[in-house]
Amino acid sequence: MTTQPGSELRRLRALVADLDAIVWEADVASSRFTFVSQRAEDLLGWPRRRWTSEPGFWADHIHPDDRERAVSDFLTASTQGRAHDLEYRFLAKDDRVVWLRDIGHTVPDHQGNPSLVRGIMVDITRQKLTEESQQEAEQRFRRLVEQLPGMVYIEGFADDPTQPAPLEYISPQIEQILGFSAEEWLSNPTEWWDHVHPEDRQRMHEEYRHAVDTGGPYAADYRLISRDGRVVWMHDEAVLVTDEGSPLFWQGVLLNVTEQHAASHRAEESEFKYRSLVERIPAIVYLESLAKGTDDVFYISPQVEQILGVSQGEWVRDPSIWFDLMHPDDRARVEELNRIADQTTQAFSAEYKLIARDGRTVWIRDEAVIVRDET
């Protein structure tokens, strides 16, 4: 069966009309469009005749921000006989901005010189809007990350905790905290480990291995050496991101806790000095709970053993030992004074006798005040 030329032409026209794309042809020498399919009018609203009758129509309706680049790339490709693949925004008749992907190739004349350019334009607006939305979300997240008072990072996974894994991202706060640029740490896989304080490395490895073995989060405090030689305490928390059980990378945050460590150290020094002072004076110092119905002592100084022959641990463990050791002649009076002090929260003051473990009678002057919560 022989196909008639007319039926082939009709089939070709139907094919072009059915395409969800603008089919076009342009003359290389004049850059004038010689044909555009009906889809141009359907998509962009401009009559097809304007494309072919107005030499500058296509260029004039490209978005101003894209015009110079798109026209230059088109002319370069067509005059050099090369294919082109462009993306640009086009201004529709109803003022919509439509993103087009423009793909074309040149057709040479009988002498091999570029004569025509033929191609298609595809509407990619939805794809571009999705990309822009993703980029905006990424930018918002990046701005948030880069304003946090710490360093956010993404680190590759390594089975061997003694071997450094590649650092895939670290936020720019690293420069403010440690004096290194993010690029320096990203370009050298050992940079992080090289600046961990030697005394903390083994403990870091153990914490890392524990997190990997248990599947739990990683958390550790350790010291990093900054560019200028300062010791910076960091609190490191990270979770292992997996895909169907397979580890992909660590996502974490490093917080500068140098001040907290310094404050804790000062508090420990202060407590040591206070304890040393308390435990050297010739008296028994104690702290007792005011919880209703209890007389629990949660601290008593070691002089209690020297004066009464009772160890600190025994006194703290047994809330009744105070009254048990009290001389029977004083017990009722002191118990009443203690009850009044508890009820009124006034200072307690009394003199009474305690029976030491070796049977000696020891006269005690007992002074106590209420310590109130600042809140």
Image (tube, rainbow, N blue to C red):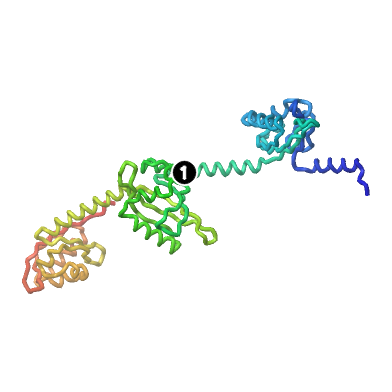
| x and y, in percent, of residue 311 in the image | 16, 69
Q: Is residue 369 visible?
A: yes
- The quadrant holding residue 372 is bottom left
| x and y, in percent, of residue 313 in the image | 19, 68
**Residue displayed at 38% across by 58% down:** 205
Relative vertical location of residue 127 with respect to residue 249 in this rendering, above or below = above
**Residue displayed at 71% across by 38% down:** 103
Graded by Cα atoms within 10 Å as few (under 14), some (14 to 19) or many (20 or more), the crowding at tag 1 reads: few
Q: Can residue 47 be seen in this view?
A: no
**Residue displayed at 64% across by 43% down:** 127
- The quadrant holding residue 226 is top left
Relative vertical location of residue 256 with respect to residue 286 in this rendering, above or below = above
Relative vertical location of residue 298 with respect to residue 28 in this rendering, above or below = below
Circle 1 SS class? helix
Choose between 51 and 228: the one closer to the eye: 228
Q: What residue type is labelled 1?
A: Leu
| x and y, in percent, of residue 175 in the image | 39, 41
Left or right: 54 in relation to 292: right
Relative vertical location of residue 203 with respect to residue 262 in this rendering, above or below = below
Left or right: 81 in relation to 272: right
Q: Name the residue under label 1.
A: 144
Q: Which residue lies furthest to the front in this view?
A: 111
Left or right: 87 in relation to 280: right
Choose between 271 and 366: the one closer to the eye: 271
**Residue displayed at 13% across by 71% down:** 325
